[in-house]
Image (tube, rainbow, N blue to C red):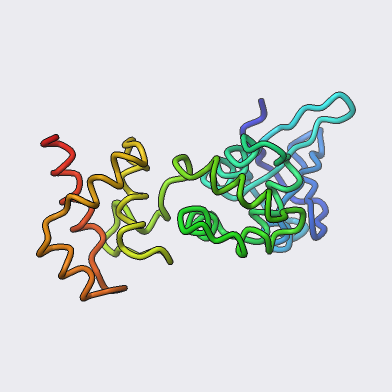
Amino acid sequence: MISFVKGTVVSAAVDHVVVDVGAVGLHVLCTPAVATSLHVGDRVELRTSLIVREDAWTLYGFLDDEERGIFEQVQTVSGIGPRIALALLGTLSPDELRNAVSSKDESALMSVSGIGRKGAQRLILELADRLGPARSIVGGTTSTITSGGWRSAVSAGLVSLGWSAKEADAAVGALDGDLVESADAQGDDADVSVLLKAALRGLDRS
């Protein structure tokens, strides 16, 4: 397995770069955002995923481990191969993809070339408990609420910490009434980190 490549960009196109790693130039497929951000002569380090087929060994490159992880995760969904997985990341950021799945936003997923309604439904069904929340939801000083509201954000945060979706939904439903009323009143300004900690305390007592 080739986990990363480090070297000098010797050519770049809209969908790939060639990286000189010494005596070898590696052809690395990328999203347009990655490929067009690199120029000939740039020193680069890309996280990579090697896809081996009978007729080809193809190397895919990403700027960080998060993008590579998402790329590999979505390929566990039936009918999703590396081409569509790369198209997903070319259209949606990791956080946008998480939000689309958690909020069951089929339209956002169908905006990706190669994904129809059935494909979008499979992504939502099979990735619902596996992608976790947007990174800004858990562990930061600022919390962002997904399009599904603070309940979806808290539930997704619990799932990312290892609880099942059923347990997460139950914990959200068991939150203190006053806390829920306050969060509903605040709407998009609700502090997800506070709500998440309260839900975790409830799970720890159960």
Q: Position of residue 134 (x, y in %)?
A: 42, 55
* Depicted 24 relative to depicted 137: above or below: above
Residue at image point 68% right, 64% down: 111
Among the 4 quarters of the image, the one containing residue 168: top left
Residue at image point 17% right, 50% down: 174
Of all residues, the one furthest to the right in this rendering is 55
Left or right of 186 in this view: 85? right
Q: Position of residue 51 (x, y in %)?
A: 74, 32
* Depicted 192 relative to depicted 86: above or below: below
Residue at image point 62% right, 32% down: 3
User: Considering depth in this image, is 169 or 38 the residue closer to the camera?
Assistant: 169
Residue at image point 33% right, 35% down: 162
Left or right of 174 in this view: 73? right
Q: Position of residue 130 (x, y in %)?
A: 47, 40
The quadrant of the image that shows the N terminus is: top right
Q: How many marks?
A: 0
The quadrant of the image that shows the C terminus is: top left
Left or right of 144 in this view: 73? right
Left or right of 60 in this view: 71? left
User: Considering depth in this image, is 189 or 57 the residue closer to the camera?
Assistant: 189
User: Considering depth in this image, is 126 or 51 the residue closer to the camera?
Assistant: 126
